[in-house]
Amino acid sequence: MTTETKENVVTEDHAEHHEMGFWGKYVFSRDHKAIGMQFMMTALFMLFIGGGLALTLRMRLAWPEAEFMGVDMKQFGGETYNVLFSMHATVMIFFVIIPFLVGAFGNFVIPLHIGARDMAFPFLNGLSYWIMPLAGFVMFGGILLEGVEAGLKSGAFASGGWTSYPSLSVIAGYGQTLWCISLIIVGTSSIMGAVNYVTTIVKMRAPGMTFGRMSLTVWSIFITAILILFGTPVLTSALIMLILDRHFGTTFFTNDGQPLLYQHLFWFYSHPAVYIMILPGMGIASDIISVFARKPIFGYKAMAAAMAGIAGLGFIVWGHHMFQSGMNPYLGTYFMIATMMIALPSAVKSFNWLGTLWRGNIHFTTPMLNALGFVSMFIIGGLSGIFMAATTVDLMIHDTYFIVAHIHYVLFGGSLFGVFAGITYWFPKMFGRMFSETLGKIHFVLTFVGFNCVFFPMHIVGAAGLPRRYAAYIGEGASKTWEHMQPYQQFMTVSAIVLGLAQVFFLIALIYSAIWGKKAEKNPWKANTLEWTLDSPPPHGNFHPDLPTVYHGPYEYNSALVEEDYLPQDRKLEAAGVGGDDGQEDAPSGEGTA
């Protein structure tokens, strides 16, 4: 009998059930690894849908009166353009970034990092995935009911922006209701996953795996899950009230209601949602930078505290999205100061990453390049955010392309580089083969250059005052004020095409590496965390026959205690009294998960 806690014994019974068929193993699976990969593949599919919408609207902006492959760009003006940018933002936020960073990596990594056999609630875990495709079908229900062309004319798709402010979202077509229902389903999926993550991390850590020995990836997803549990019900409430206003004659937001109430409810969730989309990337980048700099993470406790600080401050700054709404100056001053305070924990993390890299033995692998891309893009996006924290500045630039540049540097340059870093880093554990370094580096260069060529010029045109959310800036019906900006639009669109093709290249590289890539050994990166003690890919139930015992922290690189430059967390040293990074004895006290 092993020295497992009661929770682990229950999970072990689940892990050792009889062999399942194809459908039970890969489709309706309860295995956290399979579910994580399902999230990843679905998010990858939605990435190309969201990217296709983005390229369509960029083609409209660059050549609003041209034809491409027999398609007249004029038909993508007006209401159709509103649909394009509304659905693009919705898909990328709710169906790509959050499922990637929270659903895919949260599921795949957490049990492997904390030494558990599976999630606390395997059935709930599987259900959290399977309602995601349902949400996608609802979101694009207009295609199924009427087709694309008829649906665009009849209002079958959301057209109020990803924020969907009343009163526009109340008078929009029935697609706006589908949008609300879809996001309620997505929120339900997120809450199911968050309950699983928090319970698993709190109750199912292996013996010796204290909170002070958890990887920063696990810390980041743990904090993100708490954000989801506190924030998502507020958005769900707002969406339900919006549906009631649209169809049942209530007056929460319209008629005698308060449109600003919707903004408060929406941003109380949606500003923390920015950190839901960036915190897991911070954890992933921290782990990867430590591994490939061959150094302990600089300021481990400060890094974990900074992520918690970012999350806490994220809940009290939602009003900076509403400076344009006629806010009381004293209230605006509070939100301005609170927003600027977020720069402090963000700066802590940035300096800690630099401290980890300083004098490290840096290996520029594909995961490392993407992690460094994440850090650099996040810093640029954060610096531009400081401008918008100032009320007087935000009033001038709020409705310009400067905002578009900022959010994409944080949520594309930040989040998606974190996604690419995570996929290429854990690819050996997912598929049992190595991701092609050559193809991976080509993809990184194309993406990094293409991304900056698309979005950095938006700072320039935004600072010049170019308004966002216009279907065209030249041609019939457009103001001649911005004609001199059209070369920027065309340059950004050509760069966006290159950026889109780079992602097609990534898909090809992923398929090629999964089938023909070099077979992966257990620990190709010489990393310390527990997943690298398992076969590639790990077996069902992960750890057999017993759960590991943890003796060290996750970042013991170049330790004086061993000859190698890494010290796995489950390696017990012979010398008595030699402990981990928290000063405990070599053997863990009790069956502690405290």
Image (tube, rainbow, N blue to C red):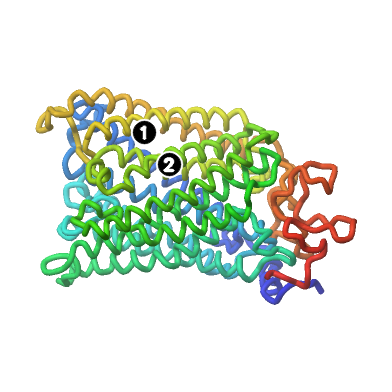
Residue at left offset 67%, top offset 74%: 7
The residue that disc 2 covers is 412
Residue at left offset 27%, top offset 45%: 394
Measured as percent of width and height from the top left, residue 472 is found at 19, 33
| Secondary element type, mark 1 | helix
Direction from residue 4 to residue 123 in the image, left or right = left
How many dots with numbers?
2
Residue at left offset 58%, top offset 39%: 354
Q: Decide if residue 40 is in sight here.
A: yes
Q: Which mark is residue 99?
A: none
Res 463 → quadrant: top left
Q: Are marks 1 and 2 in contact (CB under 8 Å)?
A: yes
Mark 1 crowdedness (10 Å alpha carbons): few <14, some 14-19, many ≥20: many
Direction from residue 207 to residue 194 in the image, left or right = left
Q: Quadrant of the C terminus?
A: bottom right
Measured as percent of width and height from the top left, residue 569 is found at 75, 55
Res 75 → quadrant: top left
| Secondary element type, mark 2 | loop
Q: Decide if residue 50 is in sight here.
A: no
Question: Is 459 located above or below residue 275 in the figure?
Answer: above
Measured as percent of width and height from the top left, residue 187 is found at 40, 63
The residue that disc 1 covers is 455
